[in-house]
Amino acid sequence: MTGKEFGVAVLGAGRIGMLHAENLMAAVPGLTLKVVADPVPEAVGTARERLDVKGEEDWRVAVQDPDVDAVIICSPTEQHAEQIREAAAAGKHIFCEKPIDRDLASIDELLEYVEEQGVKFQTGFNRRFDRNFAALRKRTVEGEVGDLWILKITSRDPELPPPSYLQVSGGLFFDMAIHDFDMARFLADDEIREVTACGSALVSEGTKEAGDIDTALTTVRFENEVLAQIDNCRQTTYGYDQRVEILGRDGMLMADNERLDTVTFADSSGFHRQTLPHFFLERYRNSYARELEQFRDALEGAPVAVSGFDGRQAVLAAVAADRSLRERRTVALEEVEQDLKDGTMARRGDE
Ligand SMILES: NC(=O)c1ccc[n+]([C@@H]2O[C@H](COP(=O)([O-])OP(=O)(O)OC[C@H]3O[C@@H](n4cnc5c(N)ncnc54)[C@H](O)[C@@H]3O)[C@@H](O)[C@H]2O)c1
């Protein structure tokens, strides 16, 4: 660490914005939370009260604040593009929650502009910093299982989001599986070549009415022919299920779920263990603090740990998965890239 303090604005004081703001207050030396912005007065009030920090209802005022060197974008996804552009124009470094946007052409324009402006950009794929998945990646790239053959990612939420969220989430592939596309790329250390997605609305009628799915199996083939299977569901009876398995020529690596504690109670009815952390805020708490430390390091001159390109490639996979689901066929990412080049892809708002 250089000892320099960077002033930070958090844009959006919802679930993830408040978590990042609290982490900044408590656990990330080198980053100082200067202001929290949210258009909802109650959200600003809560942030002021809980964090004893300046609150703004107009996010533009926070971006322009001379004490702010960097922004952490935690607003709803459809707000990200405008905020990235404005922050980059003001010369502010950017940490942006996933997905960067749902429109690939827009992401490409934004990342080019960010580059031109010379500001740092990190994508919020926090799971890379989870201790289990970070260890899996390290041991995999060190060659412990030899040549990779199969990755299996299980990523199931404990409960459906509220119907209002389903309307704006952009769908399971963009909102939920996006983390898993990134995890697959991270663990395989390779680019995805093609995607075959299968999905259903089994958990609730509401999902179907929203035109979405709540259960999906997605098969991924990487450029190097390695295969990955991603298993997503929006509901379980037993908590937030987050596991990964990696099969290779020399063995298997497996990261199991975290438990609330490791105590086992045994009686005549069996062996009983603690349940799983309820959801992402509990399960991934440490990884959110670590990704901000990485952002601090990037501001101090280190390479960005999760780049805009990483954010883009996960969205590319989500676009292919969405197309695969709708057209019931395998979709090569190259096909989506070609449509993007030809300008034949629907842009945000076209549909
Ligand atoms: N990395 C992760 O694990 C993770 C987890 C949850 C959400 N997210 C992402 O974070 C973003 C926010 O999700 P959330 O669950 O916190 O949503 P949320 O609905 O809980 O919070 C969003 C907040 O942004 C505010 N807001 C609306 N328009 C705004 C604007 N123009 N400027 C600033 N604030 C604005 C809303 O009033 C609300 O308080 C989404 O992009 C989502 O995909 C990432």
Image (tube, rainbow, N blue to C red):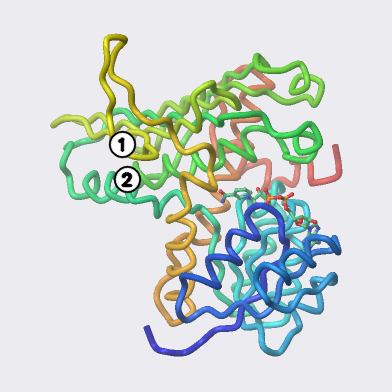
Residue at left offset 33%, top offset 22%:
272
For the image, the number of numbered tags is 2
User: Mark 1 or mark 2: which comes first in sequence?
Assistant: 2
Residue at left offset 67%, top offset 59%:
74
Report helix, strand or loop for mark 1: strand
**Quadrant into which the C terminus falls:** top right
Q: Where is mark 2, residue-wise?
A: 132
Quarter of the rendering containing residue 13: bottom right
**Where in the figure is residue 85, as x and y percent of width and height?**
73, 69
Q: Quick one: label 2, few (<14), some, or many (20+) residues within 10 Å?
A: some
Q: As drawn, which residue projects farthest toward the top?
A: 268
**Where in the figure is residue 182, as x and y percent of width and height?**
48, 45
Q: In this view, does 145 lie to the left or right of 29?
A: left
Proximity of marks 1 and 2: CB atoms separated by less than 8 Å: yes
Q: Is residue 259 left or right of residue 157?
A: left
Q: Where is mark 1, residue-wise?
A: 255
**Where in the figure is residue 57, as x and y percent of width and height?**
84, 70
Quarter of the rendering containing residue 334: top right
Q: In this view, does 301 lie to the left or right of 139?
A: right
Mark 2 is on which residue type? Asn
Measured Cα–Cα span from mark 1 to mark 2: 6 Å
